[in-house]
Image: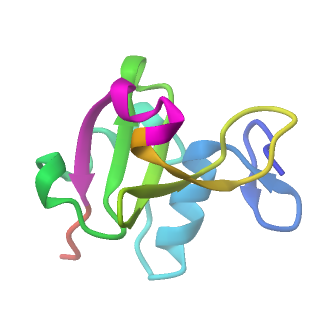
């Protein structure tokens, strides 16, 4: 479920908690803040998105993970579950303001 400040599958996630948890599984530490995450990745044009790229939305208060085929996984808001949505059909696509790729160093 969505949980503000959440970063665990057992207790719930907020959007940046989901992203930081997923990358931690790969041994990559990321901040638990959509605003801080915006500066962590290399900018990527929408036409070149790959699975794992970070997606940022208007105001930078929301982040999701691109999973391919025009879809993302994200923790949307209180009272909802983590979900996979199509960018084009969900209303999120029109609010997309940037994408970033995390590169292992």
Residue 95, horizontal then vertical, whole percent: 38, 24
Q: Position of residue 52 (x, y in %)?
A: 36, 67
The single residue placed furthest to the top in the displayed view is 59
Is 102 above or below relative to 99?
below
Image-based side of 71 in relation to 54, left or right: right
The magenta stretch is 89-101
Q: Is residue 40 left or right of residue 44?
A: right
Name the residue located 25 percent from the left edge and 45 percent from the top edge: 99
- In which quadrant will I find the C terminus? bottom left
Looking at the image, residue 14 lies above or below residue 27: above
Left or right, 84 with respect to 11, comes to left
63 lies above or below 28: above
Q: Per the image, is 91 magenta?
A: yes
Q: How is the image coloured?
A: rainbow
Q: Which residue is at a point 31% across and 60% down the rendered structure image?
A: 53
Write the residue at 62% across / 51% down: 17
Instruction: Specify whether residue 89 is in view.
Output: yes
Q: Which of 58/38 is in front?
A: 58
Observer able to see residue 43 = no
- In the image, 99 versus 39, the foreground residue is 99
On whether residue 14 falls in the magenta region, the answer is no
Instruction: From this view, report whether residue 72 is shown above or below residue 22.
Output: above
């Amino acid at each position: 479920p969505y949980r503000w400040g959440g970063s665990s599958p057992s207790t719930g996630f907020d959007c940046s908690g989901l992203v930081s948890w997923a990358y931690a599984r790969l041994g990559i530490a990321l901040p638990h803040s959509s605003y801080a995450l915006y500066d962590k990745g290399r900018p990527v044009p929408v036409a070149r998105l790959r699975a794992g790229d970070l997606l940022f939305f208007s105001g930078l208060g929301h982040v999701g993970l691109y999973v391919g085929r025009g879809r993302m996984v994200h923790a949307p808001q209180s009272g909802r579950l983590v979900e996979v949505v199509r960018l084009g059909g969900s209303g999120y696509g029109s609010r997309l303001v940037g994408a970033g790729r995390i590169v292992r160093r």
